[in-house]
Amino acid sequence: MAGAQLGKSEVLLNVIGYHIEHDPCPTLMLQPSLDMAQAFSKDRITSGLLNTTPTLRGKVKDPRARDANNTTMHKIFPGGSISLVGANSPSGLASRPVRICLADEVDRYPVSAGNEGDPIDLARKRTSTFWNRKMIMCSTPTNKNQSRIEAAFENTDKREYYVPCTDCGHHQVMEWKNVHWQKDQPETACYVCEECGSAWDDAARGRAIRRGEWRATAPFVGRAGFRLSGLCSPWTPLASAVSDFLQAKKLPETLRVWVNTYLGQSWEEDSERLDDFQISTHREDYSSDELPQEVVFLTAGVDVQDDRLEMEVVGWGRDEESWSVDYKAFYGDPASAQVWADLDSYLTLTFSTVDGRELDIKATAIDTGGHHTQAVYKFCKPRLGRRIFAIKGVGGEGRPIVGRPSTNNHIKCKLFPIGVDTAKETIYSRLKIKEIGPGYCHFPNHYDDEYFAMLTAEKVVKRYRKGFHRREWIKVRQRNEALDCRVYALAALSIVGVNVNIIAQRSMKTKADGDLDNKPKPKVRRKMPRREGGFVNGWR
């Protein structure tokens, strides 16, 4: 279940190698999704794997054209076969009986394979022909109470890996709270025994791991479950783990990834609703005429309504600390040219910082999901060079903030899909940050209460759909334009993919060099030629 770096390919190799030699069986390897480009890449990897592994060399024929026994996603060898199928392919899941089914990264599976239902259930039915079938599920977990692998693990004997202390011999499950280090010094990291308090370096930790054993923590009900964290990985030194943690904890979204992938634990949100009054306390004394010196990059998000365009300009600093620069509405019919001309004129403005730098808007994202899609296309296409992007929000958990663009429209305008659920989760998690620093959101004093009500106008609800709990965003009030604009401004930053920290570092260096150049230089006293005195030269 967990994110320990033990490599699922080792499990796959052991299964295939054993059954090649001893027990004929068809094997199905199920993955979250599988397109032809991915399959081609995996086929090249598989070919190299087969040729470099002595026990597998020669067992599978080399790829040939028109050979149904050795295709990209189906290979037959003496004693069995293996098929690669995407969890989003109902036809692949219903094609053949298998005895061993390996389901990889099950938390990334869609709720339904097409219209056929749960992909895990479909795959399990493929094994019903065999009395000695095996179903293997593995994954890193995602959200608390919504994770497939977490639910599956709870229905097993819950085996944990217990390691003995090298000093007192006490067996324990390794936990992150027992990792200690000196402040800002990851290289001093050690693991402390929960019983005797002895400190383990990586060598002692490695010895303890080698002597460890699996112990069930619940009665056996016909299913074995195993959970392991990255603390048991011999390939990741504690110093590296601590360094990754210190970097990840700066932002909630990066900390969530670290908890899921390294600790192998599901992530639980603090709360599902934001208090607009609490967020309004983030107001500060600055304006768009004189931005804080920490701002180094500007993006804009535009929401298209029936009678206006609403826009927010957001300034970004180190570790994506953000400042709302301006929130503005352009009133007019979006089907007419005037309102777009007003927006175009605004997007060419420059903004000044307190230290004298001039910043312009580097990227803009405009929503096409309203009633004026074609107008947005016509505005964005000729301005792509100015990084003015047409976007379309796509709902659903687990989608990236920015997907692969397409030009599937009649004027061939590049359109970027935006994972709005992921973007809203990112924004809400940052709005909860109370200390100024990485991810913190600043707002100017002149913003009224209506802005903050719009910014927090949605909440997450959990609904039971097709056998699974799903997180859905719903409105708690009608107007939510401020939230949409902030989502689009974040999307614009993600589309250009800049590293704000590097820009901030360069800005600081430029400022330091400028201060050095502007520093008053010491006056150099002009040397007068020395006058020779004495009787001989006195007549001159």
Image (tube, rainbow, N blue to C red):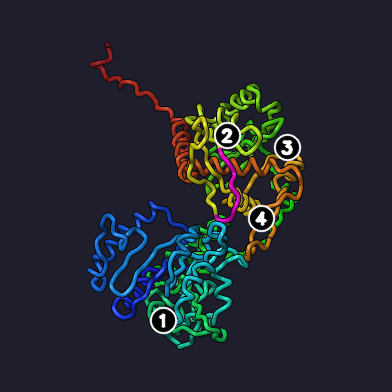
Q: Is residue 472 left or right of residue 383?
A: right
Picture residue at 32% right of the left edge, 60% below the top: 68
Q: Which mark's residue is nearer the viewer, 4 or 1?
A: 4
Q: Which residue is mark 4?
A: 472
Q: Residue 467: name its quadrant.
A: bottom right
- Residue type at mark 4 is Glu
Q: Which mark's residue is nearer the viewer, 3 or 4?
A: 4
Image location of residue 109, percent across then percent down: 52, 61
User: Alpha-carbon distance for marks 3 and 1?
Assistant: 59 Å
Quick one: label 3, few (<14), some, or many (20+) residues within 10 Å? few
Residue 95, label in figure: none
Question: Reading the chain from its start, which is encountered first: label 3 or label 4?
Answer: 3
Image location of residue 408, percent across then percent down: 50, 37
Q: Is residue 468 left or right of residue 280?
A: left
Look at the numbered disc 3 and give the secondary structure of its residue: loop
The front one of 13 and 289 is 13
Look at the numbered disc 1 and give the secondary structure of its residue: helix
Residue 531 visible in this rendered orientation of the protein: yes
Look at the numbered disc 2 and give the secondary structure of its residue: loop
Q: Which residue is mark 1?
A: 208
Q: Which residue is mark 3?
A: 446
514 in the magenta segment: no
